[in-house]
Image (spheres, rainbow, N blue to C red):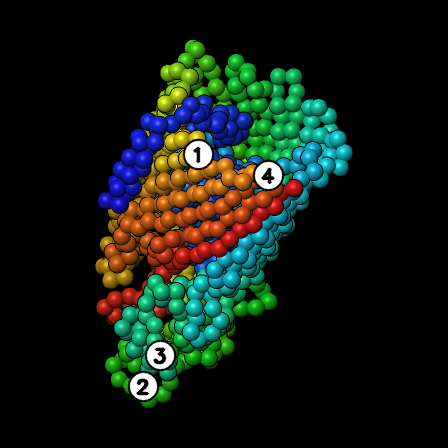
Amino acid sequence: MNGFRLSAIAATILVSSLSHAEKLVLEEVVVTAQKRTESMQDVPVSVSAISGDDLSNTGFRDVGDIAAQVPSLMVTTNASPLNTSFRIRRIGNEGNIPTFEPDTALIIDGAFRSRSGLGLGDLVDVKSVEVLKGPQSTLYGKNAGAGVVSITTQGPTQDLEGSVEGSLGSDNFQAVKAAINVPVSDRLSTRFSVSATRRDSLVENRLGEDFDNLDGKALRGQLQFDATENLTARLIIGHVKRDMNPMMGDTYSSPSQVAIVQQAGAQIRNNNPEDRIVEQSDRSVFDQTADDGVLTLEYAGAGFNLTSISSFEDYEVDVRLNGVEQLPLNLVKFNDLQKGDSFSQEFRLASEDGATVSWLAGMFYLDNTLERGDRSRPEFLLESDIEEYGDAVAEVVLGVPTPMDLPVFGVEGDRGDFYAVQDTSSLGLFGQATIPLSETLEFTTGLRYSYEEKDARIAQSNVTSAAGCVPPLNRNLVCSLTPDGNNFADDDSWSAVTGNMNISYFMNDETMLYGLISKGFKAGGYSLQNGGATADIRRFDEEDITNLEFGWKTEVLDRRGRINGAIFHTEYEDFQNASYVGLVFAVNNAEKVVVDGIEIDSTWLLSESLTMNLNLAYIDAKYDKYTGGQCFYGRTPDNALGQCDLSGENLPFAPKLTGNVALTWEQPLASGDLYARLDYRYMDKANYSSELDPRHEKSAYGVGNARLGWRNASYDVSAWVKNINDETYYAQITPANIATSVDGAVGSAEGSFQTFVGEPRTFGATVRYFF
């Protein structure tokens, strides 16, 4: 009901204000959704575009802030920024599995990024963000089955200019951003930017150092060389460094787990899974270094434009979870070192702007290598309380005190090792053409050939005490986490021809209707998780996508209002799905997922001073057929593999109704402008667990943000608050890392779990200086 009230209030404001509005006109929005510069109102693609000015008004810090403006986009993360994942039209997956590729392609300055989490951080000089909704498998191809998030930064110009920005906020938030543009000659210009962000921890740890702080730095340098009137080159080099305590899940321990911990010599004193208070004795670390580069060459020939985009990225992320058990005991350390490097090359040949037949052809190539593991140290190391904890579990299972400590889960110093490598090569050949059929009718069609091959391997081993991995008494954790000799190696390739057909009808100068059918494809792959998975379980099949869509782009009330929308039906055959089962993930294919929905994005000039954005999305995303789903705790499996039939269930993280309304006000004052922005995002009820545990279906909620400031050509001073109502909301809820498995072993009536909640209310002030 809150969502309908939001719509009713916004509509009342709209009607009242427009009746008194002066002769105002919305500014044209230019996008590059089809890899050429076009008016958004002429592009037969569902796209939300946010300009640099809009981003400044919202206090944009990273890609996660975009979701508050686009109802069809959700950005979720859990233990670390690298695990961030995008969901567009409710389609997405967990970012925790390095070899499990996302459904949303992330593009920064025209270059494909291999991990969604690498695009997060302190981006400076962002010029615009475009969110392309629905499968985009013709022009983008790689991992664009749900959509595309495309970020464009400000390039060098021939003006000497720059900016400096500083922010202070609650929880000792400190942020500095600076950019300077320096022309060297008539043909060569440079641009440099830097950012640094710090914040105290948001998760209190009553037994040790707190979690979920910020400490990151980013550098970015650019060169633009206008070699001739027809040839330009732009080089971008970036570096990011983060060293912080990651966010740890806030846990709920079952009564059985509370008793076991007490028997092992400790106490669980806080058992509230949403108060951002944990009890862990060891500090955990997230340490990231990433470098990237993009070289773009553009040549304007006689009747054509040639574009070359070359990019590389190289990163290393060291995550040390020294309290992976999430209990007031020292049981297991987890060292997770991930390294990756990639190179991509794209060539595009396109017709010149204004050509009667608009066409584009191109080639995309990607080579990517991922390593996970460190040969110089163990991935899992058992700690000092593991014997007491194992003995406490044994006493619960046996029902009587044991005469001596039983090392059920191993002894201190036992270690488990794994090392995984995946090499991926991807090739795409694509083309698209738009043909005018009449003065009001256009036909667009495109094809793409995709080929992808992967070479994957993992080696596992462990070193244990004399008891080793021999049942029935010994259930050493490292024996199950890294079974000795349970290695895997395989390689395979996948290919597909996909494409789209689109009819656009221009009713008049203000309204365009379009209808499209498109086919998408996502290559199969391998789950290189540690654990006892067999070779058959590690493989998952390719994903095939069919999308039907009807959309409209229209401007009304003498261009004082803009209403764009789409109605769509999308089917995913063999949808690639992942579920967390406690320290490892289960990955397989859901036979069929169906997504139906409607999206509406609108902008209204209510007066010379007041603008309103009102956006809504109603999306029904279901497992049409999924017989191999993960069972929630306590549910009886439906097959011999221990899986559950989730057919007919809503997808996780898939609220049906989402929406946002934003009011931006600006009024001249003292040789400048006083401005304010108030926005509110509504999220319908949803289940935030991959296994659809009914305990984790949460009610609808809303989050509001506000900003008040004054600016002129040189200064911008503002005060802001985020999550005004201090709403507690969820990013993800999963089984507890170790406790849930133990609950099952001892027959607990309920299972333990962990939650990752959104940021609480924060506030602060920002000062910008432009020169």
> How many marks can you see?
4
Determine the residue positioned at 27% across, 73% down: 255
Vertically, is 65 above or below 573? below
Amino acid type of the residue that numbered disc 3 sits on in the rendered structure: Gln
Which residue extends farthest front?
Answer: 670
Question: Is tag 3's residue or tag 2's residue first in the polypeptide sequence?
Answer: 3
Which residue extends farthest right?
Answer: 185
Question: Is tag 4's residue or tag 3's residue first in the polypeptide sequence?
Answer: 3
Question: Is tag 3's residue or tag 1's residue first in the polypeptide sequence?
Answer: 3
Between 468 and 32, the one nearer to me in the picture: 32
Q: Which residue is mark 1?
A: 609
**Contact (CB < 8 A) between labels 2 and 4?**
no
* Residue 402 badge: 2
Amino acid type of the residue that numbered disc 1 sits on in the rendered structure: Ser
Mark 1 or mark 2, whichever is nearer to me: 1
Determine the residue positioned at 29% across, 78% down: 259
**Contact (CB < 8 A) between labels 4 and 1?**
no
- Mark 4: few/some/many CA within 10 Å (<14, 14-19, 20+): few
Question: Is tag 4's residue or tag 1's residue first in the polypeptide sequence?
Answer: 1
As measured in the structure, the alpha-carbon distance from the residue carrying label 2 to the one carrying label 4 is 77 Å
* Residue 713 badge: 4
